[in-house]
Every structure is written in C-alpha cells, then in structure tokens.
Amino acid sequence: MTAGSKALPDRIDGWKSIGAHFGRDRTTAIRWARERELPVHRIPGGKNATVYALRHELDRWAESGHRDVDMSGTPREMVLPRRRRVVATATLIAFAVGGAGWAALPWIAPAASSSPAMLVLPRDPLTADRFLKGRDLLADRDAASIEGAIAVLRDVTRRDPGYGPGYAALAEALVLSREFGTRDDRQAFPEARAAARDALRLAPSLASAHRVNGFIAYWWEQDFATARAYFDRAIALAPADATGHFWYGNILADHGDSADALRHLRQARTMQPGSVPIQTDLAWALWSAGQDDDAVAAFNDLAQRHPDFAVIHDCLAIIRLAEGDYAGYIQGQARVAALRQSDTLLKRTDALARASTDGLGRTGEMLLQFARADRASGEHRTAAWAAFVASSTHDERSLLTILGEAEARHERWGDAGLVRRIRNRWPDETHIQAALNRLTGS
C-alpha cells in the first residue's frame, strides 16, 4: 500500500481542523458545539483545554438532523455531477473546479437582482415532506444517502405524478449516483433522462428541469447543440442561479469553448464566493484552456486549504501524468482512493506502485491496459482517456490504434484538456492532428 492510500485517522484535533472537516472555520465549529451539540471532546488541563473530535461521530451528527451541513463547505446543490471518468482505471470524477481572484474583474456580469422563484411544494403534506426528505438526502452526497434519495423521490413521483420538481430532483439524484453512488452511466442515465423529460413536460418554466436535461444531452447523448439550448433556457429562466452557470461552464470547458466556459464559471464564483467545487472547476477550465501555470497554482492553493476534497487531487494527478510524472500521478490517485474509500482504485494504485519498481515502461503499459479495459467495458463512452494515456506514455503505435478505433465507432470527443495535451505532444504528426480534428469536429 502506498503512503497516500492510508485511511484517514478517525481523530481530528483542534477547532480549526474540526471546522475544516465540514469546510467551515473554527468559529463555526465552536458555535455548533455550543448551539447544536456538535460532538467534541475536551482533554482536561489548563485554561485553554485541548479539544478533539472523532470523524465517525461528526459524520453521524451531520447525518442525524443536521443535513444542512455541507462537508465541502459549499451549498450541496453546487457540487457538480460530472460525467463519470475513469482515471487510470477506476470510476472517478475527473473534471472539477478551481480559480483565483476573479470576482472583482469588471467584465463579469453582476448576479441578477431578482431572486429565483420560490419552489412550490406538493399540496399533500405527506408528499411534500417526502420531497423535502429526498432533497435532504440528496444533499449529503454519499452513496447510501443518494440511494435513499432515489427511493424517496421515486415515491414522490408515484404519489404526485403531476409534480414536475419531483421528477427534476429524481433526475439529478440519478445523475449524482454515478459520481457519489454505485451506478454506472448505463444504469443511471436512461431513467434520469425519462425523469428529466417528465419534469420538463410538467414544469416547462422550471430552470432545474432545463439544466438537468442539458446535462444529460451533453454527457449521455453527446449532443452539444441541444445541451447548449437547454442551458441557455435554464439561465434565461433563472439568471441568478449559480448552479446553472456552474454546470454550463463545465460543459463548455469540456467542449473546448474556453472563453465562454471561463465567463460562466467566474460568474458562478461571484454568485457563490468560497465554493470549493466552483473554484476547482475553474482551475480545470484554465488547464483545459492551456493556462497551465495559473491552473496549477490554483490547484495547489486549493489542495493546501481543502486537503480532503478528492477532486482537487484527481485533477492534479492528471496534470502530473500529462507532465510525465508517473510517481506524482500514482501518489495523487492513492490520495483520491483513500478519500473516496474506493477499493477498486486502491487496488489499481497499489498495482501501479509495484509496477513502477520495474521501470516507467511497465507503469505505462499498465496504465494503458487499465484505460483500454475501461473503454471496452463501457465505463468510458469514448476512448479519449485511453488516447491521452497512450500519448502521455509516448506510445505512438497504441495512440494511432486507439484513434483509428474511435473513428471507426464514430465517436465524438469533448475532453478539451486531454486533447490539447495530445496535440501538443505530437505537433508535427499530421495524421494524429487530422484524426483529432475529425473526432472533435474541429
């Protein structure tokens, strides 16, 4: 087992670290202990007694009546449900968020002054309670809670089949189950698409219905034009909804529309200052746009301030692989495996660490083996990740084979950041450049 794959210690020492467990500051932790019975232990002695907490007790406290607590320090609805990516062989979200000091820039449009319309609850009190419970469970962003949310929201749609927001919430829960739960794309997207379409049919002016339909159109149906139309409508309906700008910016970054992506992500950041997911996706968008120094600086800053946010380490690991730093990549993924408690990824990082003792060639072969296996299994809808791995390991023959196979399957790629690095590594290979042009529609 690598050092980065060790389980997190259960004990957390000091108010600052206790607050950081929830993405909050020490003052908030002290207030919660005083007003909301946050489970904190004190070691007797002296005027300023030492305090500590146990991670499992904090998590249990957050799950039992304190569901408004955000373990990332960000409103839960702001955590982006990204397309499932497999980094070196495990199911992970690869593209996230990040950024630095853009809020004061004059070209950012101010948030709309009007508040989003208040959500109307179902008329039946029991159904309304079930809907709110499903939303609360969905906010927890862990596998068990999301599965619970799906079950509860399915019940809401059965109880009130004419309630559009119930279908929209169910669609979002299913989408999130790919990232935080146990479903793969094939298990989540078909039902999510049906629920999203029902939401739009029943509530055509509901921004979240357009937003989730746009997400599905891009990541599942690979239809950027339709996704753009949905997001444009969602933002027109709710211009002050940071989530709409956030999700749209992420899609635009993946598609390669860097200027528009950065504009929407920076807009989201002005609306939700301090959001770790938005900052992380902004950093990824910078990297995708080729602004490497700014992106790495933002990610390193985020990793220092929010060491338990797995997506940050995931993105940094990919960047290290692009730079040829295999050891850094393996270490970063081991950290992700520990934070996500992913046995699959942990096994793979252990295997990669062992392979690295046999030389870089063996490590590259194993990385590519994992990537191609994931594409063959359907875990990846395109071969972009496999092509990036082949390129990063300087395996031109495998890269050409992967590109040819992808064209034969009529794949359409986003993955702008990965594609940019492939292009940069093979600037004079016209056959590689031409294949990438065809796959991305450039």
Image (tube, helix red, strand yellow):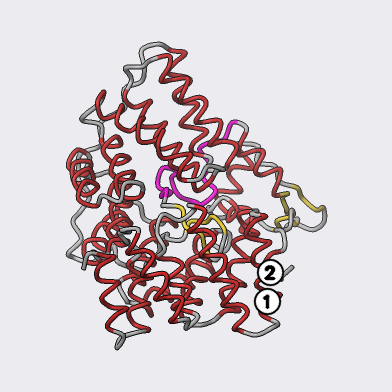
Residue lying furthest front = 408
In this image, 144 relative to 441: left or right?
right
**Coordinates of residue 19 in the picture (x, y in percent):** 59, 53
Q: Are marks 1 and 2 in contact (CB under 8 Å)?
A: yes
Q: Residues within 10 Å of mark 1 (few under 14, many from 20)?
A: some
The residue segment tinted magenta is 65-81
- Residue 78 colored in magenta in the image: yes
Exactly how many numbered labels are in the figure?
2
- Disc sitting over residue 355 in the figure: 1
Q: Which residue is mark 2?
A: 351
**Coordinates of residue 289 in the picture (x, y in percent):** 30, 72
Q: Nearer the viewer, residue 396 or 391?
A: 396
Q: Residue at coordinates 34% horizontally, 71% vertically from top-left? A: 419
Vertical relation: 209 (above or below) 259: above
- Estimate the spatial distance between the alpha carbons at disc 1 and disc 2, rounded to whole Å: 6 Å
**Coordinates of residue 253 in the picture (x, y in percent):** 30, 62
**Magenta span: chief secondary structure:** loop
In this image, 301 relative to 417: left or right?
right
Q: In what quadrant of the picture does the C terminus appear?
A: bottom left
Residue lying furthest bottom = 428
Vertical relation: 433 (above or below) 284: below
Vertical relation: 254 (above or below) 293: above
Vertical relation: 21 (above or below) 395: above
Quarter of the image for residue 403 reads: bottom left
What secondary structure is marked by label 1?
helix
Q: Nearer the viewer, residue 371 or 330?
A: 371
**Coordinates of residue 233 in the picture (x, y in percent):** 18, 41
- Residue 336 colored in magenta in the image: no
- Type of amino acid under label 1: Ala
Quarter of the image for residue 15 reads: bottom right
